[in-house]
Amino acid sequence: MTDSIDELREDALRALEEIRDDDALRVWRSQFLGRRGAVGKLFGAIGSMPQDERAAYGQGVNALQRELDAAYTEREALIQSQMLARDLEEGEIDISLPAHPQRRGGLHPATRTHREFQTIWADMGFQVYHSRDVEADDFNFTLLNLPPHHPARDMQDTFYTKDSRVLLRTHTSPGQIRAMREFGDGGTKPIRVILPGMCYRQEQVTARSEIQFTQVEGLAIGRNIRMSDLKGTIAEFAKRMYHPEAKVRFRASYFPFTEPSMEVDVECFLCGGEGCRVCKYTGWLEIAGSGMVHPTVLRNGGYDPNVWSGFAFGMGPERITMLKHGIQDIRYFWGNDLRFLQQF
Ligand code: DAH
């Protein structure tokens, strides 16, 4: 029986060498390697062989199949390169024609700024933690010191799911509780983390407000963290993000999850603080909400507020992207209009 394997090998390879074009190549393939081809027939013969010859024979046919497959691939490549050479010679391919333009995709401008923020914070030693978009009401509000009837809940009109305890997060702050519980090791370890991601609010969509936007939240917990740490850290971020000599200022404010709370402004990077239309002639642009983590929030994260302290901040990259590129209307961001997107 091995004779028939050798014979077939010889026949097949000889026939293959004479093939000059694609059509003949296809015929050869079905004749030898197709389902009803010659190699298949050899496989079919296994059944009628004595038991003790089957294994060796089967291996022989397998080897033949692999060999013919490889020879086929090699021949195919050769024929194709010869055809190409012929076409070029006969002028059927005009290599002076301009190539088809390649369309390149790009990152969304909001994604770019978002990533720029992340890179800077990561370089400054903050771990990047992606918390969830679909949140429990408790994490979005209650554990952040916004109890069910707290008036500050009105600031954020919320998309709830059918279950009124489950919602789309209205800010990245609930990630603070998750990060503390996940990395704090029962309130025994310091944390330095940023929480970037999409947020959702049920708002009237206008040129200035959208129902979805990104935020970058920051959280640092340690034994001796003070307000000067918060100020220094944000000032350093502003230098890296906006301008090596960017100035920042802090204004007293209120957030339920921080005490004291502050809003952070950076000197307008469009007019250098002189005053222009964009900064409404104040010379300053608001870039963040921030403050010292409220003792209740520390406790909800598993930390003892008598021993541990921390600062937190929340920033919105979209506004910066709009200012940077002179985008007048936030609705362009998620409208998916290629005429807008292709400009970046
Ligand atoms: N979560 C706030 C918002 O969406 C922003 C914020 C303010 C976050 C102060 C903070 C903070 O971590 O300390 O408006």
Image (cartoon, rainbow, N blue to C red):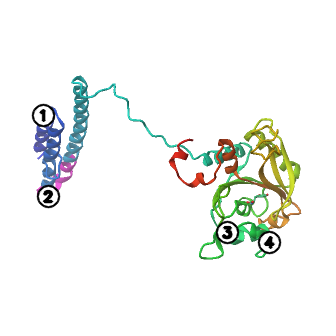
Q: Is residue 193 above or below residue 12?
A: below
Looking at the image, which residue is at 13% across and 56% down?
Answer: 50
Q: Is mark 3 within 8 Å of ligand 1?
A: no
Q: Is residue 92 above or below residue 61?
A: above
- Check residue 14 in the rendering and tell me which mark sits there, or answer none: 1
Task: Give the residues in magenta.
Answer: 48-59
Judged left or right of residue 309, residue 46 is left
Report the Cα–Cα distance between label 3 and label 4. 14 Å
What amino acid type is highlighted by mark number 2? Gly
Question: Residue 65 appears at what percent x and percent y?
Answer: 21, 45
Report the Cα–Cα distance between label 2 and label 3. 71 Å
For marks 1 and 3, the one nearer the N-term is 1
Report the Cα–Cα distance between label 1 and label 3. 75 Å
What amino acid type is highlighted by mark number 3? Thr
Looking at the image, which residue is at 17% across and 49% down?
Answer: 34
Q: Is residue 52 magenta?
A: yes
Looking at the image, which residue is at 16% across and 40% down?
Answer: 23
Q: Nearer the viewer, residue 282 or 235?
A: 282
Q: Secondary structure at mark 3?
A: loop
Q: Which residue is mark 4?
A: 151
Question: Residue 258 appears at what percent x and percent y?
Answer: 83, 61
